[in-house]
Image (tube, rainbow, N blue to C red):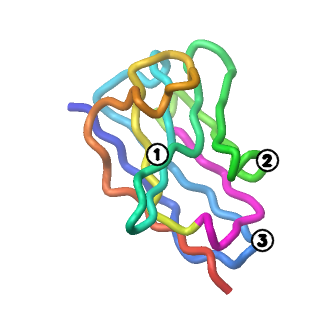
Amino acid sequence: QVQVAESGGGLAQPGGSLRLSCVVSGFTLEYYAVGWFRQVPGKEREGVACTSSSEPTTRYAASVEGRLTIVRDNAKKTVWLQMHDLKPEDTGVYYCIGLGATICHSAWTERTFGSWGQGTQVTVSS
């Protein structure tokens, strides 16, 4: 059974940092791209970062480029989202999910598979 488990969220001040973790099970991480999404109440879930499996390629939403970094360790079955210089608009529930692709192509947000996890809440506020 494909599962993901996110953790690491919390309260951070503007300009602060957090590191989110995503542990996957039920599929072999090294063969799949993985994405991080976030959701704010009243808005659709948006993709913020993607990591490819077959090459060292990543993609980021314009709103987080340069501040968020997605990192994977296939042996540990874990994908991290390192968040720096946080802004209040980064507030939301963050989810990770496997993608039915090996590369983060332009339509990567449409290639999710499996069920969404519980997510982890990130709140950026002073």
Q: In the image, is residue 53 above or below residue 123?
A: above
Looking at the image, which is closer to me, 41 or 24? 41
Separation (CA) of disc 3 from disc 1: 23 Å
What kind of residue is marked 3? Gly
Region rendered in magenta: 79-90
Q: Nearer the viewer, mark 3 or mark 1?
A: 3
Separation (CA) of disc 2 from disc 3: 13 Å
What kind of residue is marked 2? Gly
Q: Crowding near pointer 1: few (<14 within 10 Å), some, many (20+)?
A: many
Location of residue 50 in the rendering, given as x and y in whole percent from the top left corner: 57, 34
What kind of residue is marked 1? Cys
Location of residue 89 in the rendering, given as x and y in whole percent from the top left corner: 62, 68
Q: In which image quadrant can residue 114 be found? A: top left
Horizontal side of 48 relative to 64 (left or right) equals left
Looking at the image, which is closer to me, 34 or 24? 34
Q: Give the quarter of the figure containing the N terminus.
A: top left
Q: Which residue is mark 2?
A: 66
Q: Which residue is mark 1?
A: 22
Separation (CA) of disc 2 from disc 1: 20 Å
